[in-house]
Amino acid sequence: MMQRFFLLPAFALLLHAQVLSADFAGPNQFICGTSTIMGANALGTGESGFWTVLNGTADFFNANAPNTPVTGLSYGENVLQWTILAPGGPVSDQVSIWCYNSAMPLANAGPDQVVSVPPGTAQLSGSTPIAPGTCFWLVVSGPASITDPTDPNTMVSSLGVGQNVFSWSCDNGPCGTSSDQVAIQVSEVIGIEEAGHKALDIRYDAIGQRLVFGSGSTSRSITLYDEQGRVVDQLNAPAGSGVWDLSGLSNGVYLARDGSGAFQQALRFVLSR
């Protein structure tokens, strides 16, 4: 009888330890916001428990209750620990609470663009995700290559002539998902030989940082591109002499293209101070 008296409690403690080993602090949670209710297993007879914060922040309504409400969690991962003071000694288990920010904007792929080839490149301008939310770029149509699919302002290259479409997709966990598309229209520049420059009757004045139109030039519609193929400015000018002041532009390589004639003509120049 004495031997049975000591063996029975030991067996019960072993069985209790096996039950506690199965995530007794409750399942991991993914929430929209910074407050929730903890989901630890109920305490047994003669047991007490308490919550502690291992990573992040948390304000417990009752740190000794397995199902206490908790507020003040940090965005991202919060690691909380539930410790039970059992007759056989203390045991602990951890649970992660992932908090997503409802203030993260819906996906915005930025404005449509018009660029030229060469160079056939462009810079995207998607909305900025708020961690732990994530966003990524996908090519919807066109032969383009994306430098960094997770960068909202990534460069894209190898754009094909015509329309190239990209999708910016955002996953904000339980706060929701969204996506948006942007189109980049690519046109091919032709007639860049010196004969084209003369027919256009246009030259770049590096000292004055301006385009100068000769007296023999006809009426024209000129689009100015930067070295990434993005449209910088446009000018509709009457026939005859004139100037286009470009002193407000940043240093770099530019392309002035005239699309008003039967064929496109262009002039490349370098603006440098």
Image (cartoon, rainbow, N blue to C red):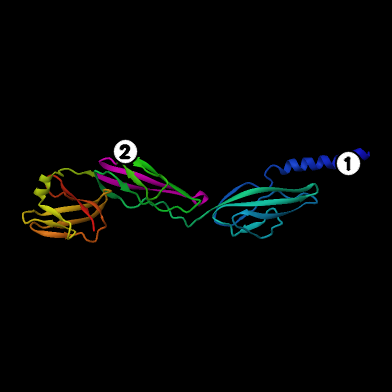
Which residue is at 20% across, 55% downward?
Answer: 234
How would you classify the magenta stretch by its main secondary structure?
strand
| Residue corresponding to mark 2 | 143
Residue 190 lies left or right of residue 19; in this view the side is: left
Which residue is at 36% across, 42% downward?
Answer: 146
- How many numbered callouts? 2
Q: Is residue 37 magenta?
A: no
Is residue 145 in sight in this rendering?
yes
Give whichever of 150, 73 is nearer the camera. 150
* Residue stretch rendered in magenta on the structure: 159-186
Which residue is at 20% across, 59% downward?
Answer: 246
Secondary structure under tag 1 reads: helix
- Identity, as a three-letter code, of the amino acid under mark 1: Phe
The answer for how far apart the CA atoms under marks 2 and 1 are is: 76 Å
- Residue 30, percent across and down? 56, 49
| Residue corresponding to mark 1 | 6
| Farthest residue, direction right | 1
